[in-house]
Image (tube, rainbow, N blue to C red):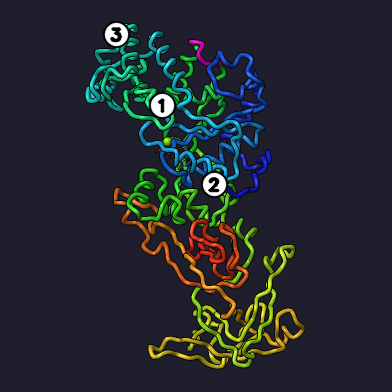
Amino acid sequence: MSKNPRPAAEPAASSSNFIRSHIEADLASGKYAARTWGGRPGPARAHAGAPADPAKIRTRFPPEPNGYLHLGHAKSICLNFGLALGYGGACHLRFDDTNPEKEEQEYVDSIRDAVQWLGFEWGSNGYFASDYFGFMYEAAEYLITSGNAYVDEQSAEQMRASRGTLTEPGKPGPWRERPAAESLARLREMREGRYADGAMVLRAKIDMASPNMNLRDPAIYRIRKATHHRTGDAWCIYPMYTFAHPIEDALENITHSICTLEFEDQRPFYDWLLGKLADGGLLARPLPQQIEFARLNLTNVVLSKRRLIQLVEEQHVSGWDDPRMPTLAGARRRGYTPEGFRLFAERIGVSKADSWIDYSVLEDCMREHLNEVAERRVAVLDPLKLIIENYPEGQQEDCFAPNHPQKPELGQRAMPLTRELWIEREDFTETPPKGYFRLFPGNKVRLRYGYVVECTGFSKDQQGRITAVHCNYLPDTKSGTPGAESIKVKGNIHWVSAVRAHAAEVRLYDRLFKAPHPGAGGRDFLLDLNPESARSVTAQLEPALAGAAAGTRFQFERHGYFVTDLRDSAPGRPVLNRAVTLRDSRGR
Ligand code: ATP
Ligand code: MG
């Protein structure tokens, strides 16, 4: 795993938002100071004597290990880990693996990798929801004996029918008032595997007439005869997510449970459940509190696991880490940087209102960071021969190019100049339009870091395609020598030595979807795929690029930011991916 600079604790002055205000108010009132925030999860009774832990707040990032992390998750990770860093707290990485069916080790590994790549560490606070299945089951029995839950034997259809609608209250079903002892016996039989999937469920007993549908006796345990990736066949009943999640937070002493807006209507259940368990002495107060923020919606990509899985499974992309994928694994291969993501998260902020962020905002953040760190190199993406007629065959000399124009400390490198060079095909034209300052017969341009040359002619093949451009160089005009300024030219073009350059595959990626809102209005989102999102060219690279290690980022002058592909590069044979162009050519 590559090393990343760790983000510094956020300065207190970093832009304020409603979540920070909330946390600051809690810190000021000492709300969470009253108890010892033990570092290990456990029920209330385990906290007596738990080691003091200096964390002032606790947040968590709770992915379900059923897919790779995407750009939306990056917002949540930067937020949760960033708050913990900023307020002297801890952020837990918790795998929400309560659903036995879709979870896999591959996803667990990729999630850990992505969080670390973003620059965050959970230290000893890495957990699995499935570690708490025992406690959750105990909590379920407690809810039954305290009159707060019952086993319902209605069919799913019957339950749906009696649940009511947004405008009509629900109706109590026939099992609602059954004795606790009977529900308890059923739950134990469910656990023993005596019933088929769906035969009955355990429901919280709250209020069938509540205006909040989530409080109309939500299901909290269901039968699922499936093998779990960690607990194997130990269980055949599994807690529902809405029941499991608040318990996980409480057991881990989370103070601020930050989630996306769609859970707002679940908050009353979150509080109801933890309140009941605290009343029963199973959990200690103060309890965690849920705070919602608007999820990231980003144009020109999809951020739904279901759709991302579809893109991979139907092979619209080469895999989860295809550089066009809006996953963190894809972004990393694409050449995006953790620092760029953290800048993006800071810049878009958090709010309570859903909105769309233009993809160009993310690209600007990447440019900003890449501009800082990427060394400059030269690559000719659409090569055309330039022959310097008056330069001796077999002669070679070095021209020196700075590795970073604003960072002299990064030094310079030698670029060999020879009689034959590669230049960009678009840097020559037979008939120049107005304002064209590059090569055309009779015109002079500077070969960047080298000499001024004057175009003397060109050659064509039988199809009329230009095969070479001819020129003479002006020996007194080498960059960095006193004669360099003797002739003023308007054009400045990049080049590489034809005998010393390396041919390499360079992939010019564009946005995966051409529509800003793929699948808007119910249309098939696949119809909005951009057929030109991946174009590959054979480019000519300057010699210094031959040995570039995989994962190194560069700015190719005039072309944008590129990275040596992590997967397809071989020693001495780099494959390069374009992360982002130098500027946004689309306009906004
Ligand atoms: P699923 O449909 O599988 O639940 P999910 O995108 O909610 O998908 P989770 O693994 O449950 O995936 O998400 C982990 C965390 O990331 C959650 O806390 C969730 O709120 C947050 N998250 C997911 N998508 C976004 C998004 N677009 N913007 C911000 N946070 C997000
Ligand atoms: Mg989710």
* Residue at left offset 34%, top offset 19%: 217
Q: Amino acid at mark 1?
A: Thr
Residue 210, percent across and down?
35, 20
Q: Earlier in the sequence, mark 3 or mark 2?
A: 3
Q: Amino acid at mark 2?
A: Ile
- Is there CB contact under 8 Å for labels 2 and 1? no
What is the residue that sits farthest to the right in this orientation? 482
Q: Residues within 10 Å of mark 3 (few under 14, many from 20)?
A: few
Where are the magenta residues, as a range? 280-284
What is the residue that sits farthest to the front in this orientation? 571
* Residue at left offset 52%, top offset 88%: 469
Marks 3/2: CA distance? 52 Å
Q: Earlier in the sequence, mark 3 or mark 1?
A: 3
Which disc, if any, is residue 178? 3
| Mark in the foreground, 2 or 1 | 1
Residue 342, percent across and down?
58, 47
| Res. 23 image quadrant | top right
Q: Is residue 540 left or right of residue 200?
A: right
